[in-house]
Structures are given as structure tokens and as C-alpha cells.
Amino acid sequence: MTLDLNEIRQQITNIDRSLLKLLSERHRLAFDVVRSKEVTQKSLRDLEREQQLLKELIEYSESQDYQLEAQYITDIFQKIIEDSVVTQQVYLQKKLNDQKGKNIRIAFLGKKGSYSHLAACNYAIRYQKQLIEVSCNSFDEVFHKVEKEEADYAVLPLENTTSGAINEVYDLLQHTELSLVGEIAYPIKHCLLINGESDLEKIDSLYSHPQVIQQCSQFIHKLDSVHIEYCESSSHAMELVANLNKPNIAALGNADGGRIYGLNVLCSNIANQLNNITRFIVIAKKPAIVSPQIHTKTLLLMSTSQQAGALVDALLVFKKHNINMLKLESRPIYGKPWEEMFYLEIEANIHNPKTEIVFNELKEYSNYLKILGCYPSEIIKPVSLDS
Ligand SMILES: C=C(O[C@@H]1C=C(C(=O)O)C=C[C@H]1O)C(=O)O
């Protein structure tokens, strides 16, 4: 006897709703947990507890013969734990820094539907704010909007897992008085977007932002000699393609963005790698205060003398004080040929007195040292079950 598909689907829907209800209950408990940790001043993250929890769930599932793979359980619960940690972080950070009321003005590159706009929406939702969009035509303008107090925050892409560093943003950071106050990791899912109906053979022109073109280079190589039209942002490209309304012209951008301009998805997941993620930074006029209970990052700008081993000597300060360095980037210094400015991202909180000692030592090995910002790490690395 075959079962009725609609009936089975109804059962699945009912189970999914029960799961959602349980997830919401667990989500709400994060607030009780963080209130309790406010009193005890415990770190928000407890890796031992997370490991224990995952191990016990896998063992419990086996003992009940639930037929669920350990990796499946781990993946799902790591996502659930991530939500709990971020919820707790946002709760503390809002208490420490929130003076902006219900609405926040965020400046970003492009129009509605650009990746920067989607990341800005994400940030506003995370902090339960109403986003007032401040759309800009260049990264330079994005910085200016906050400098002139026409926006409270700016959201800018800093690096992408496929195309690497966004040099223009790094260079603008060299000259700004603004502070980095947050980060957002946003999955970038590129699509080929068209007007109405068309097929791939008909497409001979592609419109998008240079970064997007770079991230989809392998897909583009496979197409027969297409003309590339570089645009200020992927949203400008989508708008242009929608207005041109021709079957041979397509935009590269995001499906949600495409929907805003009435475009259809012809091909999806066309980035060179599936895990195409952009890390956006959030900048503001005033530095953020980050709770010592939160896993915190600091971005530094540093130049060293032109002597052999100068950079190594500076980096050894971190080793000596057991501070982990997450990233080291370098960019040319304008007006000083062949001299480099270094960007160092470290796991440290500037409000910790130990960090001040480290910076004072670092000054001995550098010509120039500036703190670009101290911010909660919103990239929650899953705990490993092997250690
Ligand atoms: C909820 C807590 O905070 C964090 C989140 C956890 C979870 O979601 O299970 C576990 C440990 C902590 O990293 C807690 O400390 O219990």
C-alpha cells in the first residue's frame, strides 16, 4: 500500500512546526543564560560545555537508536549553539553601546539589493533595529556619510573567501578617524539574472561589479566570448539590465536583489567556490565598548622601520603575550614607494589592561601604530569534538 504524499507532507509540516517551537524556547533561554552570566561575569562561550553537550547528544541518539549520523547531529547543534552565543553577545553589546534608539542609518555601497545592502539589513535585524538606508555610489562616499554624521554606521566588505582582500576598503581605513565596531560574515550566492525568458547561448553581455566578475571567473570562462560591463555595484548592474530589457544581456548578482528589479534567475551558485563568504565590517564615529565576556577582535594599523627582521620583532610581542593573530595584510603607503602599512587582526580586547601593556611594547618596534577598532567576533567558530 502506498501512502498518500500529501498526508506524509502534512506530518512533516507538523513536526517542523514543533521543531520551530522548541528552537524558539531554546533561543529564549539564551536571555536567561546571559542574565545569569552578567552576575557571575563568566565568559559567554564555554567550549567544554559545548563539547560535552554534543558528545552526550550523539551518545543519547545512539542509545535510542534514532538512526541519525553523528555529523548530522553535530552540524545542526553547532548552528543552534551559534544562535545562542550571538544572541547573548548582542544582548550585552546593546546594553553597553546602544544610544541610537530604534532606527539606525546605515551607509552602504550600491542600491537596494546590493550585497552590502543585504549585509546591512542583516546587521539591523540582529540588533533589532529599523534600518534607514543610506545608499552610496562609492566606498569613499560610504566613509564620508558617517564622517559627516549623515549615517550612524557604514557596512563595508573587507574580504571574500574567493577573491581575497578588498584593497580599496583597506586603503580607506588607513586615512579614517572612524572606528571598526562590528563584523558580519555574509554568504554570497551569485546568480545569472535575466529579463523574462532567455537561455545561456543567447547571453553575450554580462553586467556586474568587478569583485563579482572575479568571483565568478570560472563560470564566465566557460561562456563563449561575452562582453563584460563593469558597474559601480551589483545592484546598479541589476537595475541597468532590468531597464535595458534585452534577452542577450544578463547581470551577476543575488537572487533576492534580482527580485527587487524583476529579474529571473537563469543559473545559480556560479561563484568559483561554493563557500563564497564575504566578511563585512561595521564602522562608526565612536569606538565600541566590548564586554570582556565576549570573544573580541582588534584591528591594528602598523608600520615598521625598513630594517631586517623589524616586522618579526614586532610580531614576537604577540607570541610573548600569547595573543593570537588572525590576519596580517599589507598595503602600500601612498607617497612612500616600497614602504608597507600592515593590518593586524588579533584576538584581544583593548579594554583589557594586559592589551595596553602589549601595545606599549609594540610601539617600541613600530614607526606608527593605530587601533582601528575593537569589536565582538560575530564569526562563531564551531567547537571541535576531537580535542
Ligand atoms: C547557553 C550557554 O552559552 C553558550 C551556548 C551554549 C549552548 O547553546 O548550548 C553552550 C555553552 C556556551 O558556549 C551556556 O553557557 O550554557
Image (spheres, grey):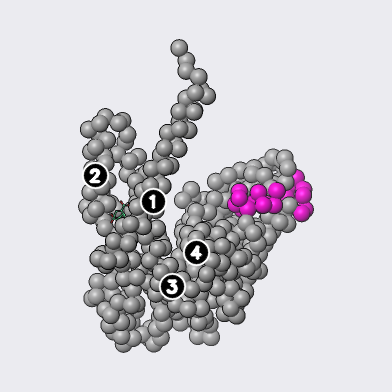
Q: CA distance from mark 4 to mark 2?
A: 33 Å
Please, what is the three-letter code of the amino acid marked with disc 2?
Lys
Mark 4 burial class by Cα count in 10 Å: few <14, some 14-19, many 20+: many
The x, y position of residue 341, in whole percent, is 44, 79
Residue 340 picture quarter: bottom left
Image quarter where the N terminus lies is top left
Which residue is identified by label 3?
A: 97
Q: CA distance from mark 1 to mark 2?
A: 21 Å
Horizontal placement of 229 versus 151: left or right? right
Which residue is identified by label 2?
A: 55
The x, y position of residue 102, in whole percent, is 54, 66
Which residue is identified by label 4?
A: 280
Question: Residue at left 50%, top 19%?
Answer: 4
- Against 364, residue 286 (above or below) is above
Mark 3 burial class by Cα count in 10 Å: few <14, some 14-19, many 20+: few
The x, y position of residue 42, in whole percent, is 26, 64
Whether residue 11 is in magenta: the answer is no
Which residue is identified by label 1?
A: 27
Q: CA distance from mark 1 to mark 3?
A: 23 Å
Q: Which residues are magenta?
A: 243-262
Secondary structure at numbered mark 4 = strand
Lower sequence index among marks 4 and 3? 3
Question: Residue at left 55%, top 73%?
Answer: 152
